Structures are given as structure tokens and as C-alpha cells.
Amino acid sequence: MESLQVRGPAYAAAAAADLAGVGLMAALETPVACCVPLGAPTLHEEEALATAELFKALGDPARVRIVNLLATAGEAVCACDLYEPLGLSQPTVSHHLKKLTDVGLLMREQRGKWAYFSLQRDAVEKLAAVADLKGACC
Amino acid sequence: MESLQVRGPAYAAAAAADLAGVGLMAALETPVACCVPLGAPTLHEEEALATAELFKALGDPARVRIVNLLATAGEAVCACDLYEPLGLSQPTVSHHLKKLTDVGLLMREQRGKWAYFSLQRDAVEKLAAVADLKGACC
DNA sequence: TTGACAAATCGACACTTGTCGATATATTTA
DNA sequence: TAAATATATCGACAAGTGTCGATTTGTCAA
């Protein structure tokens, strides 16, 4: 849970931009946690933590199904269209959507009173890269 | 090890072999949980569960580091060589190794009184396949 | 402004999980 | 056989997590 410590110059710069009122959007979008391929030559403490955080987000069947639903939909999906297929209450689905959004896997978009979610391409590609162990293994 | 949703003639043949007492080893080895790419057109209840189980196994920094250590080592590693780099007690490391082995990501090998662990190529490739969302996304 | 409605948050609960010390099991060696 | 040692299991505890009902917040339309 201490994954937010080491943020480095990039974060400091973003914070500075925020103070100037320029980087508002960037500040609101939670930055994708910094992670590194599982097969990386060296894996630091915080990198292991961030990587684990990413996997943990997918470590629940409900969230796996949400990602799958969004992937097959191919377009943004209203949160209200998830309760029934998932068989979960509105607060629970909201909870899962927040987790996936927090790690950067999902993007949230407000349309009127509805919230639409879609896969975030960057994070999805990062996931594949992190999970790739071929070459470093066996 | 291929996922279990494809239980065509090959699976039937294996079952027959088991009945004949030939496939004992294969029967005792817990099969890697059946999972399916996150972007699969349809994702059933148990598939979502199995997929989540796989990700959950990597949802802990200690286990991420274990996998990374084994990947960079390139060869089987003694459990006794993990306690110190991980900074965790022997029972705790044993616990994590068991979790990773149970989902099929690691292979355990007994050498004298030492236990050696290495990445299981099949599961590692499956992980990459499951995590791959490109094409099905955005 | 008010009413309707979608989504987020809160509070609570049971359940799971990571951790360690103590103990048990297994394997080699004397 | 007994002793030594590496690993697994057990028991316990704190912390984290998934779930839901109730409530709050935010958005649109009268």
C-alpha cells in the first residue's frame, strides 16, 4: 500500500504543472503505476510492488469479467449495463470499476448522468509487456 | 499444457490412458487451471475464476520478485537462496513458493534435502497469452 | 428550485491473506 | 540407529478484500 512513495522527477514536474494550473487533466488521470517486465534484469522494491498491484487488479473474477466485457464490446460501456451480466449490486460493481480505473486499466467517461468505461490502450499494452517472460525464462 | 476447454479426442484418449494405468503421472500433476485470454469472445464463470486465480498468484510483491529472480537466474534456484534476497522468513517464502507452484507457474524439484524451483514454461506462455488484449481492445 | 435517477461513498460484516514462531516431516550423514 | 539440516505445515494474529444496504453526490429535465 506504500506504492506511491518513489515518484521521482516526473511526478514533481507534474505537481509543479498542477500548481500552475496547467496539468489538471494529467493530474486527474491517475498515472499508470510504474511497472517493469517480470523478466527484467533487476527488479526494485517499488517496481515489484507496482507490478503486483497491476496483477492484483485482475485477481478477482468479477474484474476479469469486466475487462473481458469491455474488450469484447470494443467500445465504451455504461456502468449500468454491467450490474446484470455480472450479477452484482451497483455498489460492488462501482467498487470494482474504481479498482480497475485506479491502476490505469480502465478509462472513465461521464456522459450525462451515466458513467462509461473502456479499456485504456496504454495499460493494456503494458500488461502484456509485463506478463511477457518468454526469453527470460526456462 | 493446453487449456481444458478443448477436450476433444486428445482429452478422451488421455482419460483412456489413465484408465489403463498409463497416465498416472499426468493425473497426479495438478493441471494448470483452465484459463482463457482476457479478450476471449465469451468468458464463462469458471474461466473467469481460473484466470483471476492466475493473476492473483502474481498479485503480491514477494511473488513477483520470486518469479523475477527465477527468470533472471535462468536455472532452477534453491529455496534456501531466496530467504535472504527476499528478506522474508523461511515459512513465508515456502508459503509463496507453494502458491506459485499450485497455479502451475513454478516447478518444484527435490535435490537431496534441498528444494529447487524454476519457471514452468507452459504456464509462463499461458500467462502472456491470457494477458494479451491487443486486438480485442480499444 | 425541485424531482428523478445514476453512480459513488459509507458502514458493517464475513472471509481471505501475508506474516512469523513453533513444530513436524523428510533427507542425508555419521 | 541417531543427529543434523532443509523444507513444509500449523496456529495465531493483523491487515486487506468483496459484498451489500443505506446514504450521499452529481447530473439532467421540468
Image (cartoon, coloured by chain):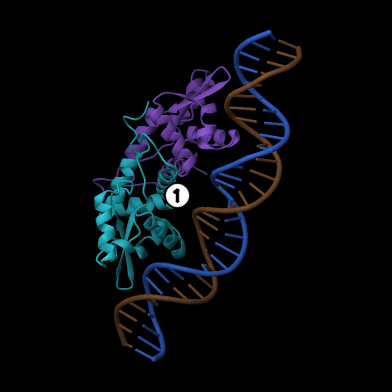
Chain colours: A purple, B cyan, C brown, D blue
Q: Quadrant of residue B96?
A: bottom left
| Marker count (numbered) | 1
Name which residue lies at 37% across and 33% down.
A124
Can you give x and y, in whole percent of width and height, for residue A102 in the image? 50, 34
Name the one closer to the observer, A28 or C4: C4
Q: Would you place residue A40 above or below residue A17 in this image?
A: below
Q: Which residue is mark 1?
A: B60
Is D19 situated above or below D7?
Answer: above
Q: In the image shown, does A24 or A105 lie closer to the viewer? A: A105
Residue D14: where, in percent of width, then height?
61, 55
Q: Quadrant of the rendered structure where residue D23 is? A: top right
Vertically, is B32 above or below A51?
below
Dot 1 falls on a residue whose secondary structure is loop
The answer for which chain carries disc 1 is B
Q: Please report the residue visible at 36 percent of the width from the left and 63 percent of the height from the top.
A: B79
Q: Is residue A29 left or right of residue B41?
A: right
Q: Position of residue A112 (x, y in %)?
A: 56, 17
Residue at point 42% right, 62% down? B94
Do we see residue A32 in this rendering?
no
In the rendered view, would you say B129 is above or below A80? below
Going by the numbered disc 1, the residue's amino acid type is Asp
